[in-house]
Image (cartoon, coloured by chain):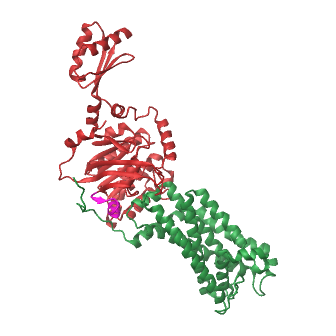
Amino acid sequence: MRTNQADRSGEQPPDDRRYAVKAEDLELTYADGTEAVSGVSMAVPEGEFFGFLGPNGAGKTTTIKVLATLLNPTAGTVHVNGFDVEADQQAIRESIGYMAQETSVITEMTARENLRFACDAYGVPRGDRSDRIEELLDLVDLADVAGKRAEGFSGGMKKRLDAAMALVHRPPLVFLDEPTTGLDPKARNRLWDYFEEINDRGTTIFLTTQYLEEADHLCDRLSVILDGEIVAEGAPETLKREVGGEILDVELDDGSDARVRAAEIVREDGIFDDDPTVDVTDDGITVTSRESRTRGPDLLVALRDAGITVTGFNVRSPTLDDVFLAITGEHLDDENPAASDADAVESAAGSTTAPDGGDR
Amino acid sequence: MSTETAPDREISRTSNSFPRDVWTNFMRWNINAIRNPFVVVSSLLQPIIFLVLFTQVFGNIAGGALQTGVSYESYLLPAIAVQISLVVASSSGIGLVDDIESGVFQKTLVTPMNRAAVFLGKTLSELIRIVVQVVIILGLGVVLGANVATGIPGALAIVGIAVLFSLWFLAFSNTVALITRDQESTIIAANMLQLPLLFVSSAFLPVSSMPPWIQTVATYNPITYGVDAARAIMLDADVMEVLDVTAFGGIWNTLVPSLAVLIVLDVILGAVAVYMINRASSASVQ
């Protein structure tokens, strides 16, 4: 299902706003013939918190590598901060921050030395360096261990240091490639706060993630990529409203007979005009309809009239997982995060999107 | 809507320059070396063990195969200087593979730093290590009884030859690193070659005292030319046996052909390494 056409007109910024990222028909095919990205178009206005969503192997990392000048596109026009990714690589490198999927810090150096190296590498003016380093150490909560070598850091600390290294030059645009994969919830929340803070300060953020909760929490707008193509685009709320309607959970007391009867009432009484989806669950029924909120009370009355006891009632918004289910017919979120991490390792090893040095 | 062809905004340009980028990377690898004392010490220890053991164990026997009036300490010391070159140069590729595996290599590629400066800085740091370690070993050799016939200028020249000699192996080590992209393979490839190549060269004994097949191998072994050049300066004599050059007179009969061989080798392997490095850091899809 393509929802981007509908969304674009309403959500595209007025023409005087500038784009941090603008890609038209971006394609990337590896030398072995693997078509990692096939015709992706996107426009990310400055200041936006943009999410790029998709399952493993969908083409997220390859796309981000093109935007960060690590890979030249096979076809298409791509501008980052207004510069062409093939003709103006140097200008792009000066104006972006990039946090790769794999944490990379120089383990022999202390946290402060790593940041100093990043300042040197990005040519931060000498007079600004010390202040900026201390500010970033504070921001990512590493001031206490600033003089300790990174080799002793936990995964979360390294991630935070890595993120700080991508920001020493205050780039107007930052690419974050699955920045929280493998982190515990506490460390993840801390990074989220941090990303929101720099976004509040005006930094455009381009985030890839396979965690729907993360995209939902952070992003102003997102694109969903599947098999190298964008299949949906819009604000999380818009996507959820469009695809799933709202979900009405009704808890019933009277056993399975009552649940089946309740489902029949929903289907046959015409309470909801839009042909809702009804599921019989373990303790009641679930109705998915755009009219869940407005017609819910009518359903309760109808159930009472039919002599069915209602013990619980709740209208909730669909999650992004409901969106994903509607678009792709499968869940993106794996129920077991450990298993999905194992898949990630496997698919990284088997796929051509090698995450290391510039070979892919 | 068509995309803008001219950039529509100002970005803050970096204050980077080529020398600064070289310096940044030079210092990064110096810190790396200092923080890994085990690596530095062991790369110095192996040649020291060779120097002490060989002079003690073979000193008396080997002396018979040498020209009269030359101590085995003086004969061996230039070879040990070359050995240091080999050991340090072989670690260059290991550092690169380390960077690729840890993602720091890619991180560097996204920065505005000049790529040539990145590698130049790293290489300079390795060359400094060679200089420091060769100076240490020369001092130790003199303490053990070796004599640099050409004095302090000669000792400096030996340091220079150790650096010139290291370049081809440094390039080789980086090339292997980029082909295998694997730390263990790089270590094995570098170490596997080092010792056998040292033995089938003029490093430890005069080539003329060895079987004909070794003499043939030694003629095509780059180590022979590094050792001969350093030894000619050490002993102030024409010591080359694998090539019979008489056109230049004195130690130049050894130095000119040796240095020529080393320079050609450096240029060829250097070019291969530069090609490989460019390929690895380019954005062209592979």
Which residue is nearer to you in this view: B233 or B35? B233
> Which chain is represented by green in the image?
B
Compared with B206, B86 (above or below) is: above
Q: Residue at x 60, y 82 (%)?
A: B259
Point out residue A62 in the picture as x, y percentages from the top left corner: 41, 50
Quarter-of-image position of residue A273: top left
Compared with A47, B30 (above or below) is: below
Left or right, residue A101 beside residue B207 = left
Which residue is nearer to you in this view: A37 or A265? A37
Quarter-of-image position of residue B252: bottom right
Left or right, residue B44 beside residue B20 = right
Q: Quadrant of the N terminus of chain A?
A: top left
Number of dots carrying numbers? 0
Which span is picked out in magenta? A81-94
Point out residue B228 in the picture as x, y percentages from the top left corner: 67, 81
Q: Residue at x 78, y 76 (%)?
A: B212
Left or right, residue B244 beside residue A228 = right
Compared with A25, B172 (above or below) is: below
Point out residue B16 in the picture as x, y percentages from the top left corner: 36, 68
Q: Residue furthest front?
A: A33
- In the figure, the shade used to draw chain A is red
Q: Residue at x 30, y 8 (%)?
A: A308
Assess whether residue A353 is covered by the magenta stretch.
no
Point out residue B222 in the picture as x, y percentages from the top left corner: 65, 75
Residue A219 seen: no
